Image: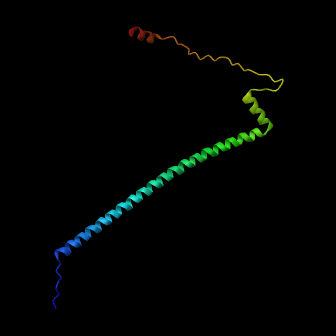
């Protein structure tokens, strides 16, 4: 028995092509929004990584500063450290203590001038300008 093919009408063919084009357009639009969302997430992750690196650097600075201050506080807790700080900051001395000034001789940094030799004298006499 012979099979008959259904004839497609022009309207059905146009509808099939239109639905296909609309489907492709929707897929392209969905791919565009997915790519845009991925790009935005990448930007957020990069910004978060930069902020984290800055925060870690700031934390290290603060920890070093804290360590320095803790050392200074521990030095000031002892009577000897307190006395040293008072002497340094205010320039005080105990009764009976004197000041010693060390005077160094000025070092001579003169460059010894050498007498020009015969060739140098000749060269200077030839090139007088």
Q: Please report the residue visible at 29 percent of the width from the left and 65 percent of the height from the top.
A: 25
65 shown above or below 108 = below
Quarter location, residue 31: bottom left
Where residue 104 sits in the image (x, y, percent)? 69, 19
Residue sitting nearer the eye, 23 or 75: 23
Q: Please report the residue visible at 77 percent of the width from the left and 35 percent of the height from the top.
A: 82
Residue sitting nearer the eye, 36 or 85: 36
Q: Please report the residue visible at 44 percent of the width from the left and 57 percent of the height from the top.
A: 41
Q: Quadrant of the C terminus?
A: top left
Quarter location, residue 39: bottom left
Where residue 123 sits in the image (x, y, percent)? 41, 11
Quarter location, residue 8: bottom left
Residue sitting nearer the eye, 44 or 79: 44
Where residue 46 sits in the image (x, y, percent)? 47, 53
103 shown above or below 17 = above
74 shown above or below 50 = above
Q: Quadrant of the N terminus?
A: bottom left
Where residue 85 sits in the image (x, y, percent)? 74, 33
Q: Residue furthest front?
A: 11
Q: Please report the residue visible at 32 percent of the width from the left and 66 percent of the height from the top.
A: 27
According to the image, what is the colour scheme of the structure?
A: rainbow
28 shown above or below 63 = below
Total numbered labels = 0
């Amino acid at each position: 028995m012979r099979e008959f093919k259904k004839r497609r009408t022009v309207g059905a063919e146009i509808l099939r092509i239109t639905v296909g084009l609309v489907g492709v357009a929707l897929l392209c639009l969905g791919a565009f929004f997915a790519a845009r969302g991925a790009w935005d997430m990448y930007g957020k992750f990069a910004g978060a990584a930069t902020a984290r690196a800055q925060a870690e650097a700031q934390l290290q600075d603060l920890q070093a500063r804290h360590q320095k201050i803790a050392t200074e506080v521990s030095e000031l807790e002892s009577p000897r450290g307190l006395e040293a700080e008072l002497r340094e900051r205010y320039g005080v001395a105990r009764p009976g203590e004197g000041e010693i000034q060390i005077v160094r001789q000025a070092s001579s940094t003169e460059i010894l001038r050498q007498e020009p030799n015969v060739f140098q004298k000749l060269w200077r006499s030839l090139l007088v300008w």
